[in-house]
């Protein structure tokens, strides 16, 4: 066995399929205001994952009755229940410069993992590398026995678009070819509309087509329907690009606090010369600005340094390289989080987890 926690606090809260509560509202306000907050730490996201096999818990620290740190944790079993894992997507939410706060919150995480019999907890903080002093993450990892040489769930590197200024300012920051394609889509009579729940079959059929073309797996249709049902219309939109009423592409975009995120997207194999995906991304940015978002996360590019990305994007098409070619054109900054880390409680479970992940990849 690895770490055995001391129980210093007992702030545990289970997220289930139940009416939205005052506790949820308080937590979501904390996530929205936190500098490292993310849609993946919201109560709606916990409910989404709870519908598909996960158990969600929150741990937190309060001062003067207000949240100051916390983590929304997901637990599930895998490999015929031989593996029990915990996962903190885009968390914990903590002041990464405050050692005392980190120590106490990790104690809370340890206790939650112990109660749920988890052999490991995987954390993926939504913290940009350039916001921590050199060596700070390494020091935290060493102090708290975090294994950082591990697989990732969310892509650590992404392109972030600045939505501040006027629309002309945003367009001016894009590469000329991208601006041209946005305007070309309009000239080619591509229109974008906001879909409804009844349009989810359109979205799913486009996802099937895209997955087959790109040779990657997609979620079940019930997953996308649940995501839309839980977040729209306040925090999510399904945008559909059409020509002559024929759907050509669609994306699902989410907003929380100052952040908008492009999580799911799909396109048809037909009429691609009309550039419907460019019309969609521009419409998504306009949608995000209308909700006072100041940046737009395009959610994933190859995990390579910017110089390498620019040197190789024209030759490579494996993995996320094909999407980088398009995403680079929107004039954003290539940013990387501090990455993923594993906190191991049972070495045998961890070896089994790594073996299973290696087979999946």
Image: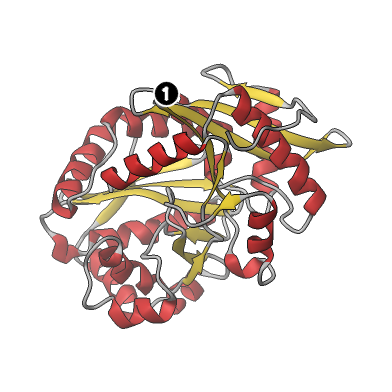
- Quarter location, residue 273: bottom left
Q: Using the rendered image of the protein, determine whether residue 155 is visible from the camera's viewpoint.
A: yes
Residue beneath label 1, please? Answer: 51
Look at the numbered disc 1 and give the secondary structure of its residue: loop
Q: Residue furthest right?
A: 64
Crowd class of label 1 (few under 14; some 14 to 19; many from 20; radius 10 Å): some
Numbered disc total: 1
**Percent position (x, y) of residue 221?**
27, 31
Viewer-proximal residue, 341 or 33?
A: 341
Q: Residue furthest top?
A: 18
- Quarter location, residue 282: bottom left
**Percent position (x, y) of residue 160?**
49, 65
**Percent position (x, y) of residue 34?**
69, 49
Viewer-proximal residue, 314 or 271?
A: 314
Viewer-proximal residue, 298 or 315?
A: 315
Colour convention: secondary structure
Left-right relation of 177 to 42: left
Q: Residue at x 64, y 30 (%)?
A: 58
Left-right relation of 27 to 2: right
User: Considering only vertical position in the picture, is 309 above or below 26?
Assistant: below
User: Considering only vertical position in the picture, is 270 above or below 202?
Assistant: below
User: Considering only vertical position in the picture, is 132 above or below 313?
Assistant: above
Q: Using the rendered image of the protein, determine whether residue 240 is visible from the camera's viewpoint.
A: no
Viewer-proximal residue, 250 or 216?
A: 216
User: Considering only vertical position in the picture, is 158 above or below 116?
Assistant: below
Q: Residue furthest left?
A: 270
Which quadrant does the N terminus fall into? top right
């Amino acid at each position: 066995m690895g770490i055995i926690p001391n129980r210093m606090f007992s702030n545990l809260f289970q997220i289930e399929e139940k009416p939205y509560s005052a506790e949820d509202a308080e937590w979501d306000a904390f996530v929205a205001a936190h500098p490292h907050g993310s849609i993946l730490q919201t109560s709606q996201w916990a409910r989404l994952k709870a519908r598909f096999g996960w158990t969600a818990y929150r741990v937190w620290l309060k001062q003067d009755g207000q949240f100051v740190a916390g983590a929304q944790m997901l637990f599930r079993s895998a490999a015929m229940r031989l593996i029990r894992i915990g996962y903190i997507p885009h968390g914990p939410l903590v002041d990464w410069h405050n050692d005392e706060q980190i120590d106490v919150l990790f104690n809370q995480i340890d206790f939650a993992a112990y109660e749920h019999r988890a052999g490991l907890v995987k954390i993926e903080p939504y913290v940009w590398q350039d916001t921590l002093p050199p060596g700070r993450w390494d020091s935290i990892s060493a102090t708290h026995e975090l294994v950082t040489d591990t697989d990732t769930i969310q892509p650590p590197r992404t392109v972030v678009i600045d939505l501040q200024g006027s629309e002309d300012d945003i367009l001016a920051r894009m590469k000329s070819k991208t601006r041209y394609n946005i305007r070309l889509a309009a000239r080619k009579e591509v229109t974008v509309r906001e879909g409804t729940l009844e349009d989810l079959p359109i979205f799913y059929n486009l996802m099937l087509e895209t997955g087959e073309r790109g040779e990657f797996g997609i979620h079940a249709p019930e997953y996308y329907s649940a995501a839309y049902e839980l977040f729209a219309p306040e925090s999510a939109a399904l945008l559909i690009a059409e020509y002559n009423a024929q759907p050509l592409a669609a994306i699902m975009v989410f907003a929380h606090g100052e952040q908008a995120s492009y999580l799911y997207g799909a396109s048809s194999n037909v009429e691609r010369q009309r550039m419907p995906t460019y019309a969609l991304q521009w419409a998504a940015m306009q949608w995000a600005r209308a909700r006072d978002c100041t940046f737009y996360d395009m959610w994933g590019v190859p995990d390579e340094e910017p110089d390498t990305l620019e040197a190789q994007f024209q030759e490579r098409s494996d993995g996320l390289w094909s999407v980088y070619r398009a995403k680079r054109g929107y004039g954003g900054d290539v940013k990387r989080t501090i990455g993923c880390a594993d906190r191991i409680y049972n070495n045998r479970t961890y070896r089994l987890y790594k073996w299973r992940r290696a087979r999946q990849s």
